[in-house]
Image (cartoon, grey):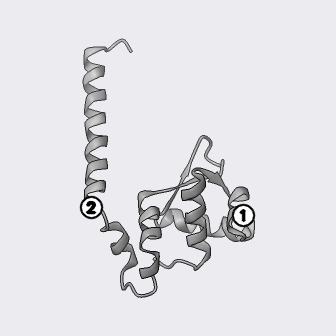
Amino acid sequence: MKLRQPTDFRILEALEKTGRNVATNLEAHTNKSRENINTRLPVLVDYGLVEKIGPAERSGLYEITADGKSALIHRDQYKDADDFESLIQGSDPDSHRSATSQRSLTRRESEEDDIRNPQK
């Protein structure tokens, strides 16, 4: 994971502060050019720090992920970390397990509801 400082961290900060947002608004919040923001957002998506969300495929609406928030928490360690990706992904393993368990439980409840109420 190769982050561009300070741009990538400014994008993450802006998304954490403002919630879901588009490149035009992130430009104003980060004092970086829209071109720069548009270049970095797909990279942050690839790293799993940001997620591109709907409603349309080309909407350009982004939000920060749990790993993105973890990256902000560990920002001061970025320069010295041999494996920043492992550092941020391993920072709160219980929350990841908890989220996975919750998705599994929700899916199972939904399937059971479909069995009980097939006419939905």
Q: In terms of depth relative to the viewer, which is nearer, 86 or 6? A: 6
Q: Secondary structure at mark 2?
A: helix
Residue 48 visible in the shown view? no
Q: Distance between the Cα atoms at labels 2 and 1?
A: 33 Å
As displayed, is residue 87 above or below residue 63?
Answer: below
Q: Residues within 10 Å of mark 1 (few under 14, many from 20)?
A: some
> SS for tag 1?
helix
Quadrant location of the N terminus? Answer: bottom left
Q: Which residue is mark 2?
A: 93
Left or right: where 84 falls relative to 36:
left
Please state which amino acid type lies under the numbered disc 2.
Pro
Residue 31 x %, y %: 72, 70
Please give left or right for residue 23 compared with residue 71 in the image: right
Between 18 and 118, the one nearer to me in the picture: 18
> Is 101 placed above or below 13 here?
above
Label 1 belongs to which residue?
27
User: Where, by quadrant of the figure, is residue 92 drawn?
Assistant: bottom left
Which residue sits at x=71%, y=71%? 32
